[in-house]
Image (cartoon, grey):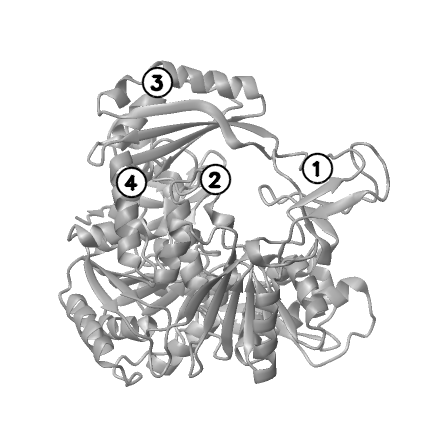
Amino acid sequence: MTRFHPPGAPVAVLTTQPLDRALDYRAPEGGVEDGAFVEVPLGPRKVLGVVWGAAAGDWPVEKLRPILRVLPVPPMAQAFRDFIERSAAYTLTPLPAMLRLGLRAPGLGEAPGKRRVYTLGTGEPDRATAARAAVIDALQSRPGDVFALSELADMAGVSSGVVKGLLKSGAVLEQATPRDADYPTLDPQRPGKTLAEDQIAAAEGLRTSVKSGTYGTTLLKGVTGSGKTEVYLEAVAEALAQGRQALVLLPEIALTGEFLTRVEARFGARPAEWHSGVTQAERRRCWTHVATGQARLVVGARSSLFLPFRSLGLIVVDEEHDTSYKQEDGVLYSARDMAVLRASCEGAQVILATATPSLESWANAELGKYARLDLTSRFGDAVMPKLATIDMRDEQLPGGRWVSPTLQRAIEARIIEGEQSLIFLNRRGYAPVTLCRACGQQVACHQCDARMVEHRFQKRLMCHQCGETAPMPDACPSCKVEGKMAAVGPGVERMAEEVTTLFPEARVAILSSDLFGSARSLKAKVEEIARGGADIIVGTQLVAKGHNFPKLTLVGVIDADLGLQGSDLRAAERTFQLMRQVSGRAGRADKPGVALMQTYQPEHPVIRAILSGDEESFLREEADQRRAAGVPPYGRMAGIVISDTDGATAFDVGNALARDITPLAAIGAEVYGPAPAPIARIRGRHRVRLLVKAPRQAPIQPALADWVGRIILPRSTRLSIDIDPQSFL
């Protein structure tokens, strides 16, 4: 219950600083209520925090320092504070670190008013320099956007003086604009698209759930192209009509362009956006208006779950199966699971939309924890693509080639018909391995136990674990022999090179996140392709994430066996999802589509399941195997990673944990390890891993906290706990 604390009363303030508890302060003049955003002194600094309730009372009031000021934003709602506490407890994350996710907005302490922003002008610089050209290039890459001075300078890699030096010529314009202007009004009564019979039934079911004003989760399962978006936008309309806010999570920033257009067509205005592609000014605007309730609909990335909604009525997790919803750095959490948790705190509805549900969501629907709605046919005249395999054992391919003759003929036929083809290979860069033909040494990252990946278009080697880059070597780093470095295996860049050779007259586009300097440029490329701006698309997993290319009628998967390797318990599930999703890009308009999968294992159970389209049988078989093994979703797992600059120290900590597992044994849990992590060194730190497996109903979080709490870590050692791990690297 929200309380008001009179002036001078002791209150607890939770800050974002790495402390183990809230700190006590005195309420300022005028008093303060629970949830208020405040600025408090901490040593010589001023830091932001939130009033978390009454003080602990273990410190004399007269010795407490006063709150410096209350920020001019609405207090944090009780439901949001409950969510932060519960998510921190679930993920075993310190409360301050979890609160930090809810305060990621610049300039919160600044009063409303005018702000100076900078945008592209029509003049020409009176003097040409490389620094000035960088500013112009930065602005041209994002036409129509406005930037704060420091933001534009950082984006261009120049000083603020360079930006100001362009004002006189009119090449850059400075404007005073209202800070945090209101978002346009969305009209939930505006008619949407005409829906088919099964879509109408699903939309009505979702509307009824939203009208209830209570918590509930629905799995909206529909084949690719079945109109899931139009259906759940009807649920969004109902939430808006009820006077509540809605959040739509998307797995990939490149999807936002097309999606925002569809939202604008449905509601007559564009919603608020929250993701890495928006400017700092827009982030502050979004955060502020979400807090007041003026921003009624937010479209965002996983971090938008931590926005301060006033009255959240609906959360949609689009492509709920997507692995990018798992945060793998810093605070470790699954946005899908946290969406369900937040909705339960808010009394809101959750829609998990997908064509290929995660086994966790499918199992919850089977158990009756989630409702389930199915869309079984494509929208309008579109039909599902025909799926077939190309048995690579029967294909005659010269060395250094990966497009089979069968696939080549199919692409040629599409080019003649003026249709698009997609070549899919889930490997970024030019080649996954670069080795020396003289000594056989593979080029490895000096910071990690991982190979450097050649990115030939950028003329760099890159480590996909830590981001370390290096120029392409002329001589072997090991034996120093020149002219013997060779690329081994294909990445999308190499595939594009081969495709250009095979089809010299075709327009070839590459969709890989490495090749785009900004989210905006990536979205622009996706929109260009959707308008027919390419004959052949070569892409990574990025292309499987919900894109709609009307002219695309052929999908060719270069290596359908790639995801079947390794010991990941989710390997079969992820391969099935990825192949079904990428094949679903074909034939989404009036012309039928075909998906051809190149494989050396056409008899593999997963490949056969993909071809049959019997998803329910595949999921039931996967569920039976997981249930027998006692692993998620029929058991609990946690991953513990210990890292240190010294490998022996990391192992010592791991062994100390393994010697005393009393708290875990008490709940029936088992501990595996310690062992070197599959990638045993990242950014110069040696990594040791333990896995904990427990029964489904076991209270694993308190047991883990007790277990690791018995160990005093060396100063150089870090320990992270990943509840429900998605990756085992």
Task: Identify the residue position indicated by label 3 in the image.
Answer: 710
Q: Nearer the viewer, residue 554 or 650?
A: 554
Task: Identify the residue position indicated by label 4 in the image.
Answer: 626
- State which tag comes first along the sequence, 3 or 2: 2
Q: Position of residue 340 (x, y in %)?
A: 26, 53
Q: Nearer the viewer, residue 166 or 258?
A: 258
- State which tag comes first along the sequence, 1 or 4: 1
Examine the rendered structure and indicate whether residue 600 appears above or below residue 98.
Answer: below
How far apart marks 1 and 4 lie (CA) works out to 37 Å
Mark 3, mark 2: which one is toward the viewer? 2
SS at badge 1: loop
Q: Residue at x 67, y 54 (%)?
A: 430
How far apart marks 2 and 4 lie (CA) works out to 17 Å
Examine the rendered structure and indicate whether residue 330 appears above or below residue 586.
Answer: above
Would residue 201 appear left or right of 562 to someone viewing this image?
left
Task: Identify the residue position indicated by label 1 in the image.
Answer: 442
SS at badge 2: loop
Mark 1, mark 2: which one is toward the viewer? 2
Residue type at mark 2: give it: Gly
Would residue 448 appear left or right of 670 to someone viewing this image?
right
Residue type at mark 3: give it: Arg
Residue positioned most to the left: 212
Q: Position of residue 591 (x, y in %)?
A: 45, 82
Can residue 101 be seen in this snapshot?
no
Mark 4, mark 3: which one is toward the viewer? 4
> Callout 2: few (<14), some (14-19), or many (20+) C-alpha neighbours within 10 Å?
few
Can residue 653 be seen in this snapshot?
yes
